[in-house]
Image (spheres, coloured by chain):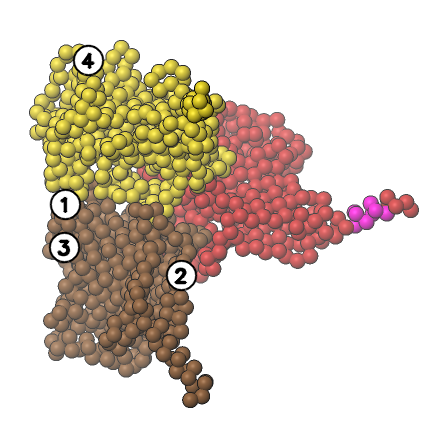
Chain colours: A yellow, B red, C brown
Amino acid sequence: MPVSILLLTLTASTTLESEMLEDTFRQILTDVDRNIHLDSWSIGSDELTPGSDTRWRIEKDVLHGGLQEGVDRIRVNNGVLTFTIIPTRGMNLWDARCGDVRLGWDSPVKEVVHPQYVNLSERGGLGWLTGFGEWINRCGLASNGAPGVDHVPSNTGASVPVDLTLHGKATYLPARKVEVIVEPGSEAGSSKGKPVIRIRGIVDETMMFGTQLRLVSEVSTIVGSRTLTVNDEIQNLAATEQEFQLLYHTNFGTPILGDGATFIAPALRVTPRDERAAEGLERWNHYGPPTAGYTEQVYFLELAANSAGDTEVLLKNASGDRGVALDFSTRGLPYMTLWKNTAALENGYVTGLEPATNYPNNRNFERKNGRVPVLKGGESHKMRLSMTALLSEQEVDQAAGRVQKLLGGRETKIDPQPVAGVSP
Amino acid sequence: MPVSILLLTLTASTTLESEMLEDTFRQILTDVDRNIHLDSWSIGSDELTPGSDTRWRIEKDVLHGGLQEGVDRIRVNNGVLTFTIIPTRGMNLWDARCGDVRLGWDSPVKEVVHPQYVNLSERGGLGWLTGFGEWINRCGLASNGAPGVDHVPSNTGASVPVDLTLHGKATYLPARKVEVIVEPGSEAGSSKGKPVIRIRGIVDETMMFGTQLRLVSEVSTIVGSRTLTVNDEIQNLAATEQEFQLLYHTNFGTPILGDGATFIAPALRVTPRDERAAEGLERWNHYGPPTAGYTEQVYFLELAANSAGDTEVLLKNASGDRGVALDFSTRGLPYMTLWKNTAALENGYVTGLEPATNYPNNRNFERKNGRVPVLKGGESHKMRLSMTALLSEQEVDQAAGRVQKLLGGRETKIDPQPVAGVSP
Amino acid sequence: MPVSILLLTLTASTTLESEMLEDTFRQILTDVDRNIHLDSWSIGSDELTPGSDTRWRIEKDVLHGGLQEGVDRIRVNNGVLTFTIIPTRGMNLWDARCGDVRLGWDSPVKEVVHPQYVNLSERGGLGWLTGFGEWINRCGLASNGAPGVDHVPSNTGASVPVDLTLHGKATYLPARKVEVIVEPGSEAGSSKGKPVIRIRGIVDETMMFGTQLRLVSEVSTIVGSRTLTVNDEIQNLAATEQEFQLLYHTNFGTPILGDGATFIAPALRVTPRDERAAEGLERWNHYGPPTAGYTEQVYFLELAANSAGDTEVLLKNASGDRGVALDFSTRGLPYMTLWKNTAALENGYVTGLEPATNYPNNRNFERKNGRVPVLKGGESHKMRLSMTALLSEQEVDQAAGRVQKLLGGRETKIDPQPVAGVSP
């Protein structure tokens, strides 16, 4: 055997072994209980799987200047898919990219605004919108949905009116603990041996005489994959019963959204939120071009799921060769809302695919309709969703096929009348 | 004389002298006027009184991560008693420890929350509770007590309604000047020659066309002592008359608070705040175990004092061998409130001993009842309180004896009716 | 020729040339898009024009401690005039000094308060006053003036009531981009060859479903000059129409303001804001001494301007030998308000000269009176004002002469009745 071939064999062998991470790697980035907070840190294939054919990297830094001063950022590149997590904003996902597809949108808000610059009460409870710019935004934990009055018990035990603000506080709460985990991949499956990257964060929404909820969040991806998965848990930290709400505000603009783009879902029922949504009912899942002066249209959906409770929806571009598939467990997220806002590009041309524990009406309205879950003291609630970038017509068609299979030939019932009693 | 004895004598002599600090030591930690702010600093017996038999230390650092990002902390260990002061939160005392006694409590709020994350207007004016976790919390300076409407003059001279928020702003105002002083001890007294540690801080609550009050605060302790003393002054910085209010929210959970713990006070009169408090009137100064669903009970007290105006109360544990004594001057703090909140441990099992310039009703109600003090332009108001850890049955009994002596055989009048007109 | 004279000649020649900066110098201090933020930086004549006879300097630093923690500051000394710009507070000018004249005032607010410590909604919408202390404060961008209810479109297209807060948000918005430019001086004019210092900053007031306005600001001064000039532009970043408002709250206390000081303006009409202002109508442009309990008096002015639309006003001290001249373009700033607040020194003895796009009534009132400008999508609006320190009787008299010339012998109409319908 000539020397060169021997070397090649050795190299290949080395690559394979080194890609298979032996031990789980763990790094704490923030831990409030131990007064730990790393400003700058990174690790990747160069250090952990040298010689692997997929180069991946995780980088932590802090943003500076203007409204971004002091914002923590974690950027993950799994070799194929890149995405950004913002620990300072409830572990939300700021944006992502896979090949030529950007997942996210162009908000009028150009900065990753630090919570210190957001007053949720502003503008009649719409202050949340002064920082809204992310791809995946968790709305919760105590409430989400439209601003307006609800009643809560005060310290004296009296029921007092409070002005709930749009989409709750979670987006502007920093994580108390942030950890990066890189695990050896499993031997089985299409990605055998590829490491798994997990970014975990704990976000508390707590106070004396009030909300005591904890979000234990995880975003994970397999090196080289086009998919990321969110596995979240909400815990009741109190000894007494508590309500909670969570909605995943996942938002898409160009290049997937465009004139002729389509939303495809195994919808058993579609209900317009208001008269404005009812106007567009015939084309509820089709999108037009950016339109100055467009007013949002919102549809509440009931989706079919498989026997495990999982369902899938997708958004595809006009030519049907790019898209994104969103699959999630309806056991944790039984309701889904579609937000259409094809306004001018400058004003925010965007659509929101929003699986949730409820519809995004004011909590008071949702409670009356039996859609506000309750946790007993110490109990918790799990939620899962996955996002996959679709980079070819074939992938888009396969996803659409899975959706059709979930529907199983059933018809989509379209309610002509909007939901009654929804706060505006 | 053998050499070893000679050495011993010399060592003893050296210890005595070195413990007696010659000159006053001063260190500025923060001074806004000079743009000074030290992130990290410490000093102690090793540097100032080397060889002393009591090792003490003062450490300044900054907390990082999550809701604690940027919070200044000063930790004092006088050799026997340790405590923490938070300049970022109005020089409040976060917690303390002496032997096996922890002074403080376990709040649902687990972080030393930075003011940037607190919106006092939240939840109907109860936003103060989103950061409430400390042992001694100053409620003021312009107002304290229940949230609700009061009227203040606007810039145009008109009387305008404002929504006062729970317990005012002082807890979430950072100190503009912070100084550490270590003084030589006095020759007299039981602690002769022991240095005195003083932590001074200035906190301004000011604005154009409104409140212009300054808190000049000092927390002091003698090295080796089980006592710390708060000496505060509120100054009217304006040329015109101003009201002010201050309440010391001193809070205790386990291990002193527990089923069977007792509050002992030279109470001349006890008035329940509301019907809920009236329910528990017979056992107003006794505590039960942590109880899920317990609603707070609040009692307004009139206390006896000695000829100098000083009074004393104590909280003792069930077995009567641990406790804390609180003595204060009723000249500066004429009113006292007892807050009982024996809720579940997870929800905040705590009692508050609250000497103040008033009762913690809304300022509007307190004004009508003549309990809102006024300072003329340039005037000031002084307040003093001391906390002493009681570590044996004997110490607890001695404190209880002092309380009995203050009462001097007078009876405690118990009002059966709650206070009328208190905002809920 | 002796050697020493030759050397002197060379030096003089070198000085002249070196003062004439060859190329434009540019330095980015903050750029959010590139995650740039310099904590500390400076440059001046020593580096750029060594040997020049006018020594100038630009210094950037960050304030620390208390309410100032994290505030960016730029100090400019052009050799004659010094001033401070605060990028963290909308590029506002904190104070200035020229010879023995201080431009600015003594507010009850002693710190350069960081926006994180300001809640605009506080005290019935007067929270802006908790940080108010600067010499030149921009009130805007979406609104300025008195707090109170106005209506705006919500995300659903409904018109919803919002509580506008005093003087809008711009003062508490940090700049997203800050740049220092030093340009070669022009050959012409009295300051030929002197470099021009420009401090540029971009401040965005943006949100989803709401305000999308950008302030592109510039403060410039010629080295060795007693004048600084503000050139600002407001841009509509949206595709749709937007209202905007801007008011320059320029404030003066001692030493210019004092008993006997006078405001001189080419006023065609003076209207008292309310009954309180009407009381002082006869002496509307004269000032008394600091007076405890004084309530503000506010006058709305219509000014004469030259054919280019420029006008000028001045404030002079009692002896007429010190003052400040303010000239501005009425094309961008058609309205002017005079704020008299000769309260006690401790409470804020101050007068405000306030050119603006409107009078500082609530926006709702201004809209009804046709004084709220509108920008179409992508449009912008320019504003200019200059401040000049007057250091002698001659300079004061010359300025007063220019004002007289603008008036051109026309009479000042004094409205006896206050403005009707103004919110208090």
Would you name the residue on which mark 2 appears? C42
Query: Mark 3 or mark 4: which is in front?
Result: 4
Q: Residue furthest front?
A: A2
| Residue C26 x %, y % | 32, 59
Quarter the C terminus of chain C occupies: bottom left
Check the residue under mark 3 and report the chain it is in. Answer: C
Residue at x-position 75% and y-position 48%: B15
> Residue C373: which numbered mark, if any?
3
- Structural crowding at the residue carrying mark 4, measured as other residues with C-alpha within 10 Å and reported as few (<14), some (14–19) or many (≥20): some
Asked whether B286 or C101 is in front, the reply is C101
- Point out which mark residue A405 bears: 4
Q: Secondary structure at mark 4?
A: helix
The image's mark for residue C239 is 1
Q: Is residue A265 left or right of residue B224?
A: left
- The residue segment tinted magenta is B6-13
Q: Relative to A19, say whether B148 is above or below.
A: below
Q: Is residue B9 magenta?
A: yes
Q: Earlier in the sequence, mark 1 or mark 3?
A: 1
| Dot 1 amino acid type | Ala
Q: Identify the residue at image location x=26%, y=66%.
A: C229
Q: Nearer the viewer, mark 2 or mark 1?
A: 2
Q: Residue at x 35, y 16 (%)?
A: A189
Confirm whether residue A72 shows in the render. Answer: yes
**Where's residue C305, x and y in %?**
14, 70
Picture residue at 25% right of the left edge, 48% below the top:
C205
Q: Looking at the magenta stretch, what is its main secondary structure? A: helix
Q: Are marks 2 and 1 in contact (CB under 8 Å)?
A: no
The answer to whether residue B189 is visible is no
Which residue type carries mark 4?
Lys
Q: Do discs 4 and 2 belong to a common subunit? A: no
